[in-house]
Amino acid sequence: MKKIIVVDDSAVLRTTIQNALCSSGYEVLAAAQGSAGLFDALERGILPDLILLDMFFPDENGIDILRKVKEKYPAIKVLVITAMNRAALNKEIRQNGCDDILHKPFDLDDLISAIQRLSWS
């Protein structure tokens, strides 16, 4: 079973994604405290196959979180989920190691398709 961690500041979106992905056969953990929750899980040895990462948090920069994940855990895939769809931002996200970008709003079928498209090697 593939393991996914969802990192988004919206509790509603985290819960919605978690429920949909669990129903599709994934093991899903929601990191409620942004990067603190994510890195706490990673440091405790909870290593997912994929991280769903929002880019904008009240007190954090998603690019910095992405960079840290890819520096410390390069084998973990990262699918960025963001409401911002600007060419410069998309380029910066890709340059910092994300494996794919999905723009909000998206439907859950699009999310599941994006996850399935990623290589799980």
Image (cartoon, rainbow, N blue to C red):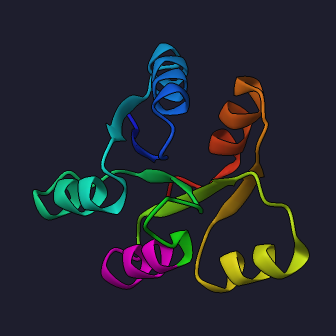
Image point (59%, 83%), residue name: 96
Does 54 sit above or below residue 14? below
Residue 72 painted magenta = yes
Q: Is residue 46 left or right of residue 3?
A: left
Image point (71%, 43%), residue name: 114
Q: What x and y, as percent, mark residue 103? A: 78, 50
Image point (46%, 24%), residue name: 15
Q: Is residue 39 left or right of residue 55?
A: left
Q: What x and y, as percent, mark residue 84? A: 78, 60
State which region is magenta.
64-74
Does 7 sit above or below residue 15? below
Q: What x and y, as percent, mark residue 113? A: 73, 35
* Residue occupying the far right of the picture: 87
Does 57 sit above or below residue 31? below
Q: Quadrant of residue 74?
A: bottom left
Q: Is residue 52 left or right of residue 84?
A: left
Count of number-bearing discs: 0
Q: What x and y, as percent, mark residue 73? A: 34, 74
Residue 15 painted magenta = no
Q: Main secondary structure of the magenta part?
A: helix
Image quarter (top left, top right, bottom left or bottom right) of the N terminus = top left
* Residue occupying the far left of the picture: 44
Q: Is residue 42 left or right of residue 83?
A: left
* Residue occupying the far front of the picture: 58
